[in-house]
Amino acid sequence: MNKIYLLLLAIMPLCFIACGSDDDEPTGVVGIENLYGTWQQTHGVAFEDGAFHHDNDVSADEAEYLRFDKNGTCAVIGGHRGVFYSNGTYSFTFNEESKSLRIGSQSLVVDILSGGTLKLKYYYTSDEYILATYKKVSDSVWDNL
């Protein structure tokens, strides 16, 4: 009986090691219905010369904000490290299959749209891009900008 008890004590920690984390980063691109609403930029990084540069978290005061409406418009309030250079309201189209998002004349690739996270890539050459990360926030945040 004691041997079985000791064996169970020895095996028990392995059960906990096998469990995954619930804090895994979202992956994939889900439907357009998840795009609607207000997004606040939280991070920005540039990929240039084969490496990441200018890797920075973005405060709420410096953030770029996007608001996607079901009527096919996206309002932009630009920040310091976002992908847009001017504020305004633009029409947008989103192709879920190709992960392409066009806002006004700006073409973007949706890297992630899942779990309240949106990651957009803006290619300024064929192999150099800005990757901006956004989190979904309440529409009241937009109303208070």
Image: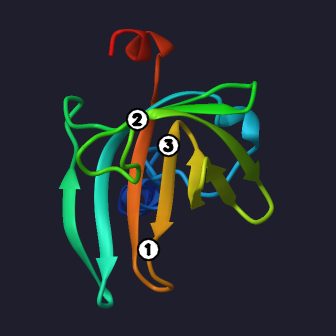
Does label 3 or label 1 sit earlier along the sequence?
Answer: 3
Residue at mark 1 = 124
Identify the residue at horizontal 68%, vertical 60% (top origin): 100
Tell me the CA gap for discs 3 and 1: 23 Å
Numbered label attached to residue 11: none
Which image quadrant for residue 144? top left
Mark 3, mark 2: which one is toward the viewer? 2
Q: Secondary structure at mark 3?
A: strand
**N-term mark: 1 or 2:** 2
User: What's the amino acid at mark 3?
Assistant: Thr
Residue at mark 2: 87
The mark total stands at: 3
Looking at the image, tell me whether mark 3 or mark 2 is earlier in sequence order. Answer: 2
Residue 53 visible? The answer is: yes
**What is the x, y in percent for residue 145?**
32, 16
Mark 1 touching mark 2, by CB under 8 A? no
**Is residue 58 rendered to the left or right of residue 137?**
left
Real-space Cα distance between discs 3 and 2? 22 Å
